[in-house]
Image (cartoon, grey):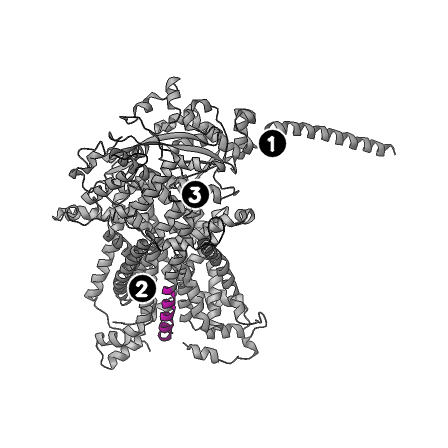
Amino acid sequence: MRLRLPRRRPRLWRVTILVLAALYFLGPIAASIRFSLIQNNGKDGLGNYTQVLHDALLSHALGTSLEIAGIATAILLVLMLPTVVWVRLKMPRIALLVESVSVLPIVIPPIVMGAGLAALQKNSGAGLQSLLFNSSLTGLTPFYVILALPFAYRSLDVGVRAIDLRTLVDAARSLGAGWFTLIVRVILPNVRTAVLTAASLSIALVLAEVVIAGTLLYDTFPVELVNQAQENTGLAVALSVLTLLITWLLLFAITFLGNRGSRARVGRLI
Amino acid sequence: MGSVAVLEQSPSLGPAARSRRGTLRGPWVGILPFALYVLLFLGLPLYEVLYGAITTSGGSLTWYNFNQTFHEPYTSDFISSLKLSLETAAIGGFFGMWLACAVVTSSPRNPLRRIVGSGSAVLAYFAGVPLAFTWIALLGRFGELTKILEHIGINLNNTSFTISSLTGVELAYVSFQVPLMVLLVTPALEGLRAEWREAATGLGASTFQYIRHVAAPVLFPAVTGAVLLLFGNAFAAYATAYALVGDTVQLVPGTIQNLMSGNVLVDENQVGLALGVEMIVVIAFIMVGYALLQRRAGRWLQ
Amino acid sequence: MKSRKHKGRAIAAALAAGALAAGVVAASGTASGATNWSNITSAKAGGGMAALVAAAKKEGTLNLIADPFNWTNYGQIITSFSKKYGIHVNDVNKLGTSQQEITALQTLGGQSRAPDAVDVGQSYALDNASLFAPYKVTEWNMIPAANKAANGTWANDYGGYISIGCNTSIVKVCPTSFADLNNAAYKNDVALDNSPVTANSAFSAVWAAALANGGSFDNITPGITFFQKLHQEGNFVETPGLPGAIASGQTPIVIDWDYNNAAAAVANAGKFKWTTAVPTDASYAAFYAQAISAKAPHPAAARLWLEYLYSSTGQNLWLKGLGRPVELQAMIKNKTVNQTYLKALPPVSKPAQYPSLAQVTAAEAVVAQQWAASQS
C-alpha cells in the first residue's frame, strides 16, 4: 500500500547543504571556464573552444579514447552482468569474495599497476609485445576493464538485487529460455539503470585515465590534454572543462533511460 | 525479496528448473570467465610488481629493495601519504555523508538527484593537473575568488593562506573525495526502507531517535566501508598534489613515479616496486576491513 | 605433336624472359630498396641523400618521444619535416624526461611504435651509447669535436643557459641575478619549472644557483642552501612553474632554460610580457644530444630526421626557438645563420663551462638526498 506523502517544504538544512556543495564543486570549474574564455590574443572569446575542433592531434586522440571506452565497456558488461547474476543465483555465499576481488583494482594505486604493466611489457617476448602492447587499443582496453570493475560490480549487483531474480529466472527457464536469452531479454531490461550506470562510469574512467596510459607511452585523449596544456593553457583548460561537462551531460541524460521502478522505493528517511 | 537462507533452501522445481541446454557441472563454472580474466589481467601485472620488488635488476633474489624503503626519504613519504589520506577521507566522508543525505531525502522527481548523481560519477574521477588548475583558477594569486575577496577587503595574498600549500592540496582532494562518498553511500541510504521510518514514527520516535537507533546502526558498516575506500583513493593519488606544490609534499605514489622515470640514482627502480608492494599491503588491510563491514551491511540491506 | 613442341618452346621462352626480368628487377632492387639502413653509418654509405630520402619516404613514419612542441620550436621543426618529406611523425609522451626516453628504448624493444630517435640530456647520451646506432650526418664536420661522440653514436644538437623568466605585469623590476632573488619584493614569486630530483632543467637551475653562491662542479650544496633560504624567506613558491601556473600568474618568476622561458613568452604574448634574462652571476649551460636507436623500426626515416636537424634549416629553426644550435659558430663563419634569430638570443655575461659525467652523477645523488629535506 503506497502511502500518500504530504508535500514537503524544502528543509533549510537540505537547501544549505546543496548550495554549499554547488559552490564548492562548481566554483573552481566556473573559475577555469572564466580563464579559458581569455584567448591567446588577450581578449575574451570562444577562441580556445573553436580551436578544439581544428586540432588534428586532439581529435585523433579523442577518437582512440572513445574507441577504447566503447570496447572496454562492452567487455565489462559482457563479463560482469552474467557473473553477477550467476553469483546471486547460484552462489550467494561467495558474493562477498567476488565483490572483494572486484574492489581490488580501485585500491591498487594506478601508478603501481602502471609499474607492473611496464615491467610486464619489458619482460614479455617480442610476440606478446606486438600482439598486446603495440597499440593502445589492445594494450589498454583489457586493463581498463579491470580498473572499471569495482563500480561496475557494485552497481550491477545493486541492480540485480533489487529485482526478484529468482522468480524471473524460474519463469524464464520454465518457458525454455537458455542463458543468453535469460540475460539479454529477461534480466537486462530490468536492470537498465544499473547497466547504464556501470557503462557511464567506465566511459568516464577511460576519458580521464592518464597514469597508466602515460606510463605505457600511449597518447590517449586525456594524456594529450595534459600535453597540450604545455603550449596552450587556455585550450587545455577549455578542453578539460568541456570533457567534464559533456560527460556530466551524458550521464545525466542516461539517467532518463533508466527504470521508473527503482525510484519509487525511496520514501521519507528523515 | 527473499533472504539468502530461502534461496539456498529452495528445492529444485522439477525438470523445468534445469534447462537441458547448459546442464552445469557445478556452480563454479559460471565464475570461471571472471576468475580467468582477473587472474590474467590483474594477476600478471601484480606478479611483475612482486617479482621486481624482490629481485635486483640482474634478476637475483634480494631483500635490498624492501630494506631501502624502511629508510629516509621513503619513511617520511609514507607518513605524508597516510596523513593526507586520513584527513581527506575523514573530511570527505563527513561532508559527503551530509550531501548524500540531502540528495536522497529530496523528492524523487527533483532533477537535482539526477544532476548530483551524474555529477558525483564525473567529479569522482576528475583529478590531477586539470583539477589542480581549477583550484588555482579559483584561489590562486589571481584567482576569481581571490579577486572577489579583494573587492570586499580581504586580501588573501597578505595572509598565510595560499593554494600552493598542503591546505590547497587538501581542498582539491576533498573535491573528489566528497563525490566519491556520495556515490558509495547513496545506495545504502536508498536502502533504508520507508517502512522502518514509518514504523519508528508510529512507535513515537522522534527524528533524532530514529537516526540514533535505527538508521545509524544500519548505515554504520556501509558508511565506514565507504570511508575506507576514500582513504584508499587518496592514498593512491599524487598528480593533483604535485601540480599544486611540486615535490615539497612527497607522497609515496609520486616517489614511485619518480623512481620509474626520473633522474635519480641508478638501480632504484626496483625500490619503487617494493614501495608499490607496501602500498598494496596497506590497502589490503583496508580491504579486509571493508569486506567485514560490507558483510554486516549486507545483512540489513538485503 | 607439333603443338606440344611449340608449347614447350613457348614455355621455355616465357621462363627465360621471366628470369631475365626477375634478374633485372633484382639488380635494381639491391641498388635502391633492399639496403638495410639500420647498419648504415652515413648518407654516402647508403647511396647518397636521394637514396636516403626515397627509403625514408617508403617507411613513411617516424617515431619520436618527449619532444614538447614548444621546446626550442620542436613543433615547427616536426611539422616542416613532415610536410617536406611526407612522413608522418608520432611524438609520444611529450612531457617525458630523458630517463623515460631511455627506458622507452629499453622497454619497447622491437615494437613498431618504439622510438626511432631520442633527444636526451648529455649524461644520458654518455651513459647509454650502447643503445644507439652510429651515424654521421653530412654536416658532421661543422660540429665541434667536444660536442659529439667520435664514433658517431650521438652528437649535441642544441643547448641553452639557465635563465630567469619574469612576468612584467606582476613584477615591477625583474631580477637579473640569483642574488636579486633574495629581495623582499619578490615574496611568493620565485619558482622552479619542475622538481630538481627528476627534471634536468630544475636540477640545472639548482646547480646554477650553486655556481652563483660559491659552489662549483664538485659542490652543488650551495645551490640547495640557496633555495632553502629562498623558501624560508617566503620568496619561493612551491607550485612548479608549469604553463598553467605561469599563465594564471601563480608563478611570476621561473628559473628554467632560456628557450623554455622564451616559449612561455610566446605562449602568453597576448596576455602579458614574459622576459628572459641569463643571470649575471652564473652562466650554466648544457647541451642536449640526438641519437638514433639501434633498434629503430624506421631506420631510414630516423637518419633523414637527423640530416634535417643538422642542416642549416633545422639548426636555424632551433635558433628561432632560442636554443643555441651546436653548429652556431660554424654557421656564423659561413654566414648560414639567421641573423634575426641570432640577435634575439639573451646576452650572456661569461661563457659556460661543462661538468663531467662523474660530476653530474655525484651532484644528482646529492640533490636526490637533500632536496626534499631542504624544502620542508
Q: Nearer the viewer, residue B195 or A3?
A: B195
Asked if the residue at tag 2 contacts the one at tag 3, i.e. Cβ–Cβ closer than 8 Å, the answer is no
- Residue C365: name its quadrant: top left
Q: Which residue is mark 3?
A: A60
The extreme top residue here reads C334
Secondary-structure class at tag 2: helix
Decide whether residue C86 is among the magenta residues: no
Residue B156: percent from left, percent from top: 16, 48
Name the residue tied to disc 2.
B227
Task: Look at label 2 and name its amino acid.
Answer: Val
Q: Check if mark 3's residue and mark 1's residue have beta carbons within 8 Å.
A: no
Residue C248 seen in this snapshot: no
Kindly report the distance in space between the C-alpha atoms of the residues bearing marks 3 and 1.
Answer: 33 Å
**Looking at the picture, does residue C60 appear above or below residue A32?**
above
Identity of the amino acid at label 3? His
User: Which residue appears at 47% of the width and 41% of the height?
Assistant: C105
Neighbourhood count class around disc 1 (C-alpha, 10 Å): few under 14, some 14–19, many 20 upward: few
In the rendered image of this protein, does residue A161 appear above or below residue A253?
below
**Chain on which label 1 sits:** C
**Are discs 3 and 2 located on one and the same chain?**
no
Placement of the C terminus of chain B among the 4 image quadrants: bottom left
The label on residue C34 is 1
Q: Position of residue A214 (x, y in %)?
A: 41, 47
Extent of the magenta region? B285-302
The subunit letter for the residue under badge 3 reads A
- Magenta region includes residue B294: yes
Give me the C-alpha separation between circle 3 and circle 2: 39 Å
Residue at coordinates 27% horizontally, 78% vertically from top-left?
B198
Q: Position of residue A270 (x, y in %)?
A: 25, 71
Prevailing SS of the magenta stretch: helix
Query: Which image quarter: residue C211?
Result: top left
